Amino acid sequence: MTLFSHTFPHFPSPGFNGTDCEINIDDCVQHRCKNGGTCVDGPNTYNCQCTPQWTGQLCDEDVDECKLQPNACQNGGTCHNQDGEHSCVCVNGWIGDDCSINFDDCAEASCTEGSTCIDRVASFYCICPPGKTGLLCHLNDACYSNPCQTGAMCDTNPVNGKYICTCPSGYKGTACNEDIDECALGNNPCEHGGRCMNTQGSFRCECSKGYTGPRCEIDINECSAMPCKNEATCLDQIGKFTCICMPARGV
């Protein structure tokens, strides 16, 4: 008995070829991925792997980083979307692609030699050595020699370097070394006819009879010592008192 064999032809599956359809056809040979997208071959097709700035089937759609990343620009920077990228417009004092770097203002500062520069956001300040003052420590500190009288507060004018004395009560003058005569300013500071006596930096009052206190404002109560006898009633008066005696009892 004779056996006959018959070989059936192979019909390739889509995307494959070869005698046994074992070879995957490279569909990436003529791919259409754009903007730097990477072609990934698949059976009878391909996919595009996009760079972060692009999206879409063929990587031809721009990604709006400003909407996708609300904090793409930091520290108040303004985000501007562009095809395939974005840019940040930083506020004063910040630099960098995302405005995250505080610009070192001390790099261009002009603090006087010997002072210390402290960087801030869009500004700086100078810590001055003893004897120097001013915004840039460029002035001699006029207060360093203690020109103001003891008790006065000394400040140095940051523009011209001259000292300014803030005087305590009772003194006046450039160096606060002139006494103010409070008794000659106008109205008598002492009440109820008291006599004003000027003192260094202040005044005192010599009170009229019957009054006391720093300004003779207190009426002395002469009855407080209970001077009246035998249950008499004491009436306080200015500088004196009067006793009202109990009426005599009948026999």
Image: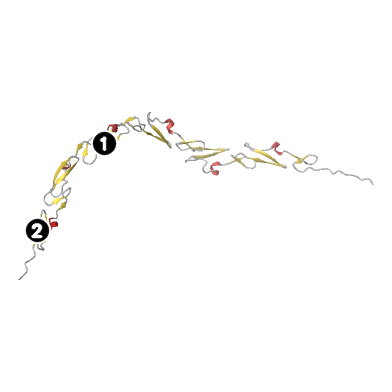
Image coordinates for residue 207, horizontal then vertical, percent: 13, 48
Estimate how packed mark 2 is, as few (under 14), some (14 to 19) or many (20 or more) residues with alpha carbons within 10 Å: some
- The answer to whether 186 appears left or right of 97 in the picture is left
Q: Is residue 243 above or below residue 45?
A: below
Residue at far left of view: 251
Which residue position is annotated with label 2? 242
| Disc number lying in front (1 or 2) | 2
Q: Nearer the viewer, residue 88 or 113?
A: 113
Q: Quadrant of residue 65?
A: top right
Residue beneath the point at 65% across and 40% down: 48
The outermost residue toward the right is 1
Q: Which kind of residue does numbered mark 2 sit on?
A: Thr
- Say which amino acid is labelled 1: Cys
| Quarter where residue 3 is shown | top right
Task: Give the camera-side residue of 200 and 119.
Answer: 200
Residue 67 x, y percent position in the rendering: 54, 44
Q: Position of residue 80 (x, y in %)?
A: 52, 39
Q: Are marks 1 and 2 in contact (CB under 8 Å)?
A: no
Image point 26% across, 36% down: which residue? 165
Which circle marks residue 136 in the picture? none
How many labels sit on residues?
Answer: 2
> Which secondary structure lies at badge 2?
strand
- Judging by the rendered image, the residue that carries numbered circle 1 is 165
Marked residue nearer the N-terminal end (1 or 2): 1
